[in-house]
Amino acid sequence: MARRVAVIGAGSSGLTCIKCCLEEGLEPVCFESSDDIGGLWRFKEIPEPERSSTYRSLVTNTSKEMMCFSDLPMPAHFPNFMHNSQLLQYLQLYAAHFNLLQHIHFQTTVLSVKQSPDFACSGQWEVLTEDRDGLKKIHIFDAVLVCTGHYTKPVMPLKDFPGFETFKGEYCHSSEYKDPEPYKGKKVVVVGIGNSGADIAVELSRVAKKTFVSTRQGAWVIRRTSHKGCPFDITAFTRLLDLQGLLLPRRLINWVSERELNQKYDHRLYGLMPKHRLFDQIPVINDDLPACILLGVVVMKPHIQEFQGSTVAFVNGTKEEQIDAVVFCTGYNCSFPFLTASVFTGPGHNLNLYKHIFPPSLEHPTLAIIGLIEPWGPIMPMAEMQARWATQVITGNFSFSFLNTCVLPSFCPSFPSPKHGNLLVEYIPYMDELANELGVRPNILRLLLTDPRLGFWVLFGPFTPCQYRLRGPGKWAGARNAILTVWDRVSQPMMTRVVPEPRPSRLPKLLVLSILLVAAIYAEKRHSKLLESPMAALNNWRMYVPAAVLRVLKT
């Protein structure tokens, strides 16, 4: 009889967990509190409590080739950076392609997850759910995969701003923001400069009277395009560059990368310069913020000192009067209200996870948290790799004990906030770590010897998730072709106007021929003079010719 696994949430992480369970012969049962799949990527006008929510114009920060699941590349006609509705469409294609919807119970909320009375022997869990009709039911599962993400509990630090109670204007968290229309003609302060804060500030600047961005830390800002207009992550994430990152000092890499960014726009001049180094924190991905600052429609400000009614005072002594609205882009806290308290064993009652997946306090590794990471890279393929590894552990293909195991997160550089620093992971090293244990990490040396073209692409080309389907469990026959045709799918949505290749210019050839002709004429003249009077020609070079040679020539 197949082991039953509860999957909580039907967003991108939940869907890949269902698929991985099916691949390993497990019986997944997914509980989704909403009425459809998609999670964060399903836009709703009215946010639902305890659920992630997006704004109408949200566009992905990672390109389609880098963020797709490893065995289903995104349609070639999709743009490289997609609107949230297009990513939702991809998730729907994924669910239909692998026949996942039949395993999902919609409008069913998980109220509690606790160990069964015989957990010490069985490792099973009791899951209490409530359906749309209010009917509660207890289920017994052999394992539980939690896929609710960490964008569920908005942080509203109103107490951190003295005098905020005197402010009579509108205010909201970014999770409640949907579009800029309500702010037309108003003076707005955006608090925070993460990706959401930058996006919202840029969007507001197009309709608001004035937009101010208040930031305590600052941020490094990176555009979505890089060399020749290619998606930045296509060129930034390669195995070769990752190898350089391992060999070179981190301080040197930071210096070189920061210098390159500041060549595009000086972060100090634009008021963006952060207190941290570039690779110590995830940067802001935004194409328009520097231009908006240059145009004066977005004004950078330091941390807010206090509110004085409709006046906002900043720590540098400046004040902005008649502020109409404040949008708090101050992030989220992780929230797992349905989990038993015994799982939270970290300092301050936080959640420590072995390899960012399993709570090490459990006697049996039958509860996994999927997608609870802040990666230097796309999260969807990382969640998929976590799900592949977790389901292998649940099936018993890996046997290990958490005892005497270091639970500190791997690949976690310094980070201003320890809470968020524990979630930060490096993309390629983390993927390779799990893939190595799964037996799906590509053997580059063997590929270079047996399939040089593929080996070259794996080593020097974009680090696409399809690399982890070339061998081992879950091998996909289409992985090789998907890797070799990456640039075809990157270019297709942009090649909507066929531009003929320019005719090769004859000017370089004519220039080379002219230089050769002049050189030949000059050489012939010099040669004729040498034949007529060798000693006269030699006098010009007397100082450079050894005396012994001169004596021989005279004789």
Image (cartoon, rainbow, N blue to C red):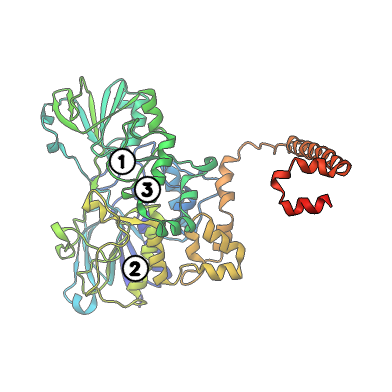
Q: Position of residue 375 (x, y in %)?
A: 35, 53
Instruction: Identify the residue shown where x is 25% and y is 72%.
Output: 405
Foreground: disc 2 or disc 3? 3
Would you place residue 455 above or below residue 397 in this image?
above
Asked whether residue 36 is in view, the answer is no
How crowded pointer 3 is (Cα within 10 Å; few <14, some 14-19, many 20+) is rated as: some
Residue 390: assigned label = 2
The answer to whether the residues at label 3 and label 1 have Cβ atoms under 8 Å apart is no
Q: Secondary structure at mark 1?
A: loop
Which residue position holds label 3?
A: 254
Q: Secondary structure at mark 3?
A: helix
Of the numbered discs 1 and 2, the one sitting upstream in the chain is 1
Of the numbered discs 3 and 1, the one sitting upstream in the chain is 1
Quarter of image, res 539? top right
Asked whether residue 168 is in view, the answer is yes
Three-letter residue code for mark 1: Gly
Foreground: disc 3 or disc 1? 3
How crowded pointer 2 is (Cα within 10 Å; few <14, some 14-19, many 20+) is rated as: many
Tell me how far mark 1 sits from mark 2, CA to CA.
31 Å
Residue placed farthest to the right in the image? 532
The answer to whether the residues at label 2 and label 3 have Cβ atoms under 8 Å apart is no
Foreground: disc 1 or disc 2? 1
Instruction: Identify the residue shown where x is 13% and y is 23%.
Output: 309
Three-letter residue code for mark 3: Asn
How crowded pointer 1 is (Cα within 10 Å; few <14, some 14-19, many 20+) is rated as: many
Which residue position holds label 1?
A: 194
Three-letter residue code for mark 2: Ala
Would you place residue 157 above or below residue 213 in this image?
below
